[in-house]
Image (cartoon, coloured by chain):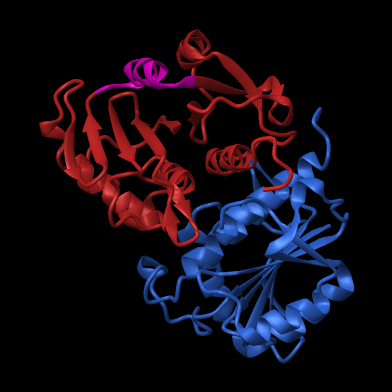
Chain colours: A red, B blue
Amino acid sequence: MRQFIIIGHEVPTTPDFSLADTAGGAGRLDVLCRCVTGAFFLSHSIRSDVRCRVVLSDSYTIRFEGSELRGLHPDERSTAARIRATLEQRDHAIGQMETNPSPGVYLSRVGVETTLTNAAEEGTVIQLHEDGQPVGTSDLPSDPVFVLSDHRDFTETETKLLSEVATQRLRLGPRRLHADQAITVAHHCLDTNGYTQF
Amino acid sequence: MRQFIIIGHEVPTTPDFSLADTAGGAGRLDVLCRCVTGAFFLSHSIRSDVRCRVVLSDSYTIRFEGSELRGLHPDERSTAARIRATLEQRDHAIGQMETNPSPGVYLSRVGVETTLTNAAEEGTVIQLHEDGQPVGTSDLPSDPVFVLSDHRDFTETETKLLSEVATQRLRLGPRRLHADQAITVAHHCLDTNGYTQF
């Protein structure tokens, strides 16, 4: 299974935001929406072997399960609507006890630290870093957990947590990409993993 | 220079569509918006060496120039708004004579055939195809023109035109991707072109 964790720093934790302003008033929720799309969508199908967690302002985590998702669409607005509908059920999320408002979508009241710790028990956490090993020269694990930040850099606390749980440090390329682009490139590297004849 | 042409089959050619329904009533304009974002955006910067053309329902073509663009944002809604504002100036586009409603954005009244022919004079047209040569084993040109379709397959006419102007046939990977994901992967392949130490 491939996993992605995207840390949103300024996104809302209540459902009272406008779908017409996800890139402004909703704290760049648009970035997270593109990441969800990048994690799951293929042309005319969904990657069922993917788990994606988005951390909302260190307060809530939404877990998306590719094998269970229904009715997800690739546009930002409908993904933002799904996140908003999920947040409407936030009173049912008590600590790590998740609520499951729609197929394949789970909400828990946990922040970055618990989410990283949980994911580290499930797979090989990879830190994407400018000083990391170029991905083309690396053996990628079969259970990677890529951790990404939204439009903001990781905080010092997040960087420290990440370095504690990460077992591999990789660089995807020479240019700094948006988080959703990094997800697409990571999928590409895994899809073609070392094979030039695919 | 890197070029991308995205052919939109059902998108509007008039500006009377809602920004709240780009994935529905606006004929999957959301796909084209993500392609524009994928073509130009890096983290906190724009790729200035990119030209991107979107063909609207074989009637109009919008040309985006990375070196001139100002105020472009990565979210779908604001790109759709830019396209809508561009279409408001459609009466000033007469055949191949472009109008330039905003910095780096040009509108002409030409369809797929003229757009492909123009691009073929400017660079090396690449056809992305399941039977193409795997990109990892190919020498990529320095002036590639990637041609992509939206959520629909190329029509027979488009396929024929494309095979006439394309000089290379490539396959990006083993999975069929969305057009914007293919753009991101193409950029990645060019960014790292054969280099494992970047």
x and y percent of residue A192 in the render? Answer: 64, 42
Q: On the rendered structure, is A5 left or right of B79?
A: left
Horizontally, is A119 left or right of A131 in the view?
left
* Residue located farthest toward the front when viewing the structure as drawn: A197
Region in magenta: A110-124
Residue A45 left/right relative to A93: right
Up-down relation of residue B49 to residue A109 (above or below) = below
Image-quadrant location for residue B99: bottom right
Front residue (pair B46, B192): B192
**Front residue (pair B162, A194):** A194
Q: Is residue A35 magenta?
A: no
The spot of residue A173 in percent (x, y) is 71, 34
Work out whether A67 lies above or below B128.
Answer: above
Residue B108 appearing in the image: no
Vertical placement of residue A147 versus A35, above or below: above
Residue B46: give x, y in percent of width and height.
69, 48
* Residue displayed at 42% across by 58% down: A75
Please determine whether, in this image, residue B149 is positioned above or below residue B110: above
Predominant secondary structure, magenta span: helix
Residue A187 visible in rendering? yes
In front of the other: A123 or A20: A123
Specify the quadrant of the image occupied by residue A83.
top left
